[in-house]
Image: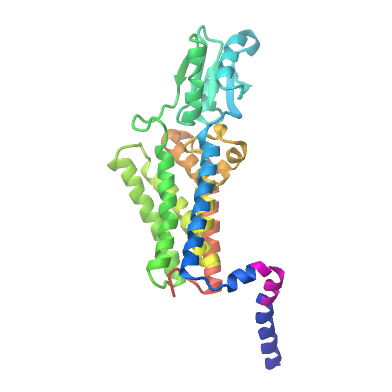
Amino acid sequence: MARVAADQHTIGSVNGPQAAGRRFPRLARIREHQWSPVERTALIAALAIVMGSLFVTTYSLALGDPVPHRVEAVIVGDPAAHAATVDAVQGVAQDSLDFRPSSSVPAALHALDEQQAYAALDITAPRPTLYLSSAAGASVARLLEGVRVVDPRVQVVDTHPLEPHDPNGLDIFYLMLVATIVGFITVFQVQAQAGALELRHTVAFVLGLAVTAALVFTFVDGPLLDRLQLPFLETWGILSLHIVAVASFATLMVFLVGRWAILPSWLFFVVLGNSSSGGAVAPPLLPRPFAVISQWLPSGATVDSLRNAVYFHDYQHVQPIAVLATWATAFFVAAAFVGHRRRAGLGRR
């Protein structure tokens, strides 16, 4: 019986690759090909060019020429009685404002506080007033501020202005971006340079990197440079979750695809995640696919959480933190599970 079982195991181990080869003959030939150093160099260069082209494509499409699509807004008063003012505001927004009625100015301002709207138009006052929130979306605010030129009677008020050192609202995006790059590049450098690690050391490394790097980045962008009024512990926690997600995903890819792990990591976090994050251009100005996925990917959830922590501290939302924590937990558990099944850890063996 033992011999039969051994024979079946041998047959299965042989037939697996052979069956895969019959199903995908071209893939089998590529895997069996003995690559020379010149061929490997050419392949790596070609893949780098392809990844760079995808980067340029997504960033150009998403960020190169922002166009408003559907901007949530509230209005106080009867639009029909003040059609000229409403038309002027809609004109600068390219008819993208999706107005819903609000019972009062305090209710409209509360909608801005809760980030349920990017603008609030009060047409009951002697002088029509457009309330904006540049902290919620600087690109949307800049677009709507153009109503001053079209209709000088409209008064524009920014209810949540950006920090003086960050007039374009990009510091939060940069903070997320550096956390992303450090998260996966460090994993790949450990894989290439550090030597063999046990799985338990790999797990400790991912958690230690996340906590330490997030602490340093929070200190540098907050107290040291004094760029943003960062709530220290909250920012530290958010960045730690983001780096756990990035580093765990990169580690998982190392276990699954080996030396090519940078390709899916680059595609998921840089090409797709960062371009749709809403950090450089607010979601209402992104192309529809990017705007839809923005709040559901780690990068977008991190930007939303950091923005709420800095500018809307009393109105922090649960959703972006829950989304980020779910990604971080899922990737971390998946990496630990696959590493355990394969008895693998980071580092060359």
- For the N terminus, which image quadrant? bottom right
Q: Quadrant of residue 330?
A: bottom right
Front residue of this view, candidates 114 and 175 = 175
Please give the count of numbered marks on the rendered protein: 0
Comparing 111 with 131, the one in front is: 131
Residue appearing at x 65%, y 80% in the figure: 13
On-image quarter of the C terminus: bottom left
Query: At 43% from the left edge and 48% from the top edge, which residue is drawn?
Result: 239
Q: Main secondary structure of the magenta part?
A: helix
Vertical order, 112 against 8 (above or below): above
- Which range of residues does the magenta coloring cover? 18-26
Tell me residue 232's x, y (percent): 36, 44
Where residue 333 appears, as percent x and y from the top left, is 54, 62
Q: Residue at x 68, y 93 (%)?
A: 3
Residue 104 visible here:
no
**In the rendered image, is residue 283 in sight?**
yes
